[in-house]
Amino acid sequence: MLDDTQEVPDDQDGYFVATRVLGYQLLHSKTAGTNSSIPFVVMCTSDVSERKRARLEKDGAKVIVVEGLSSTWMKPGDPRWADQLTKLRLFELTQYSKIAYMDSDILVTDRLDGVFYDEATLSQQTNAMSTEIKDDEAPLPRSYMLAAHADSWGYDHPFPPPADADYFNCGFLVFSPSKLIFDYYVSLLSLDGRFDAGMMEQNLMNYAHRKGGNMPWKPLWYGWNVNWATAKDYRGGARSFHAKYWDSDPSHDPMLKAMWKEQRAEMEGFYRGRELRDK
């Protein structure tokens, strides 16, 4: 998902550049590219300029523009997360049976096609525990699918992660879109205090898919993606890494940061060469 809150040149807009890098990795990279039949879809808000949308489409992305989503009581713990609730609109994209969602700030180092066949992505029957049914919440679907990975919470984390983790990170998800699930999420937006809203859509979804509830999330294979990533995770077999490697944060793993910068240079060279060839 992409929004446009930065008034800087396109090549200095970190999220925009990262979206292009991610698209290059998934569509064209010889080491990380996916099956060509899998579309690369970018969902963006209307404030993303026509110029940026056109660039992404030229790169090979399918761009879908959606309206923002907000809540009167939910206040982001970080100003950067102001538009994060709009991510819930992914569940309206019912033209797709299964979506592997990635935040734009992800480095991909190996193929991810197999995530669509992970056991956690099988459809689940919704539970019917009466104690977990709330009268002020919208009804749940009969079945659903949402799979994710546990949040690492910091660089000093075990890899593989503990099997009993109960909180997932929303930067990498596999799910089946559903209008009923979207309507359920929207009903939660009006319930002041139902859950801690500091991390916006991530906390909302962790409430909706809590382990003790009627739609518990399923854990993906731990190697598909890691946040708070380190070289240890890479050596352990992880295939993608969640961090803003374009910024000056000194805590980022230097090896992974260098790899992302190499991917950016490779992306820019690839598209420059293609455009020169097509002239």
Image (cartoon, rainbow, N blue to C red):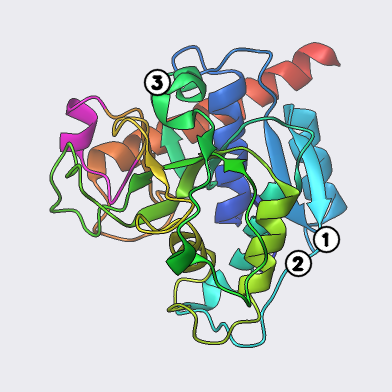
Percent position (x, y) of residue 271? 68, 25
Query: Marks 1 and 3: CB-CB under 8 Å?
Result: no
The crowd level at tag 2 (other Cα within 10 Å; few <14, some 14-19, many 20+) is: some
Q: Quadrant of the C terminus?
A: top right
**What residue sits right under mark 2 in the picture?**
68
Q: Nearer the viewer, residue 166 or 267?
A: 166
**What residue sits right under mark 1 in the picture?**
46
Determine the residue positioned at 53% across, 46% down.
126
**What residue sits right under mark 3 in the picture?**
110
Q: Is residue 151 left or right of residue 101?
A: left
Percent position (x, y) of residue 115? 46, 25
Asked if the magenta segment contains residue 92, the reply would be no
The crowd level at tag 1 (other Cα within 10 Å; few <14, some 14-19, many 20+) is: some
Q: Amino acid at mark 3?
A: Asp
Quarter of the figure with residue 177: top right
Tell me which numbered mark, 2 or 3, is placed earlier along the sequence: 2
Label 2 to label 3: alpha-carbon separation: 33 Å
Tell me which numbered mark, 1 or 3, is placed earlier along the sequence: 1
Q: Is residue 257 left or right of residue 73?
A: left
Label 1 to label 3: alpha-carbon separation: 32 Å
Percent position (x, y) of residue 90? 68, 49
Q: Amino acid at mark 1?
A: Ser
Determine the residue positioned at 24% across, 46% down.
253
Q: Residue furthest front?
A: 130
Question: Which stretch did the figure color magenta?
Answer: 226-237
Q: Check disc 3 and report its element: helix, strand or loop.
A: loop
Tell me which numbered mark, 2 or 1, is placed earlier along the sequence: 1
The label number, if any, that marks residue 96 in the structure image: none
Percent position (x, y) of residue 84? 59, 65
Q: Amino acid at mark 2?
A: Gly
The crowd level at tag 3 (other Cα within 10 Å; few <14, some 14-19, many 20+) is: some
Query: Marks 2 and 1: CB-CB under 8 Å?
Result: yes
